[in-house]
Amino acid sequence: MSESHITGSLGSGESEASTEGPKCYCDLRAKSTIGRQFWGCVKFKDGGHCNYFAWRDPKMCSFGRRVIRQLQAMHAQLLGEQSAWESNERELRHQTEVIVAMTEQHQAEIINMSE
């Protein structure tokens, strides 16, 4: 799984620049933080930073990746089912409108016939 690269900044609890971490958009080694670790541009405090940000989470195990793929497949299937239900609902609403209009027309005809 690849690390995300979204705009952000370093928080408190910064550690020293790493020789092992990714390079930021300034082509410098990013800093890692303490706590929920993330990488950020080493020039953040200087104000000339590039807004590089990436979570420093461990790689996911194969079981976790498999579960996520299964959940994504289930989500896609449910979206398809939802679409079908919504289509059925639209059709039933249309049919209901037609039946109501026909009923009103027949009621009007019955009233005219009884006069």
Image (cartoon, helix red, strand yellow):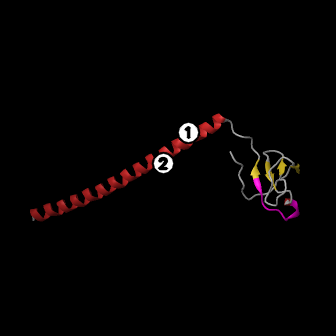
Residue drawn at point x = 14 percent, y = 63 percent: 109
Q: Residue 31 in the image: x percent, y percent?
A: 84, 52
User: Residue 91, located in which quarter of the rendered image?
Assistant: bottom left
- Tell me if residue 87 is in the magenta stretch: no
Q: Is residue 59 above or below residue 4?
A: above
Residue 15 screen position, x and y as percent: 88, 49
Q: Amino acid at mark 2?
A: Leu
Q: Quadrant of residue 51?
A: bottom right
- Image-based side of 75 in relation to 2, left or right: left
Residue at x-position 22% and y-position 59%: 102
> At numbered mark 2, what does the secondary structure look like: helix, strand or loop?
helix
* Residue 23 appears left or right of 97: right
Residue extending farthest to the top is 63
Q: Identify the element where label 1 is drawn.
A: helix
Q: Quadrant of the C terminus?
A: bottom left
Q: Which residue is mark 2?
A: 79
Question: Which residue was labeled with disc 1?
Answer: 70
Q: Name the residue rendered at 48%, 45% in the picture.
A: 78
Q: Position of residue 98 (x, y in %)?
A: 26, 58
Look at the image and give the residue range highlighted in magenta: 45-53
Magenta-drawn stretch, dominant element (helix, strand or loop): loop
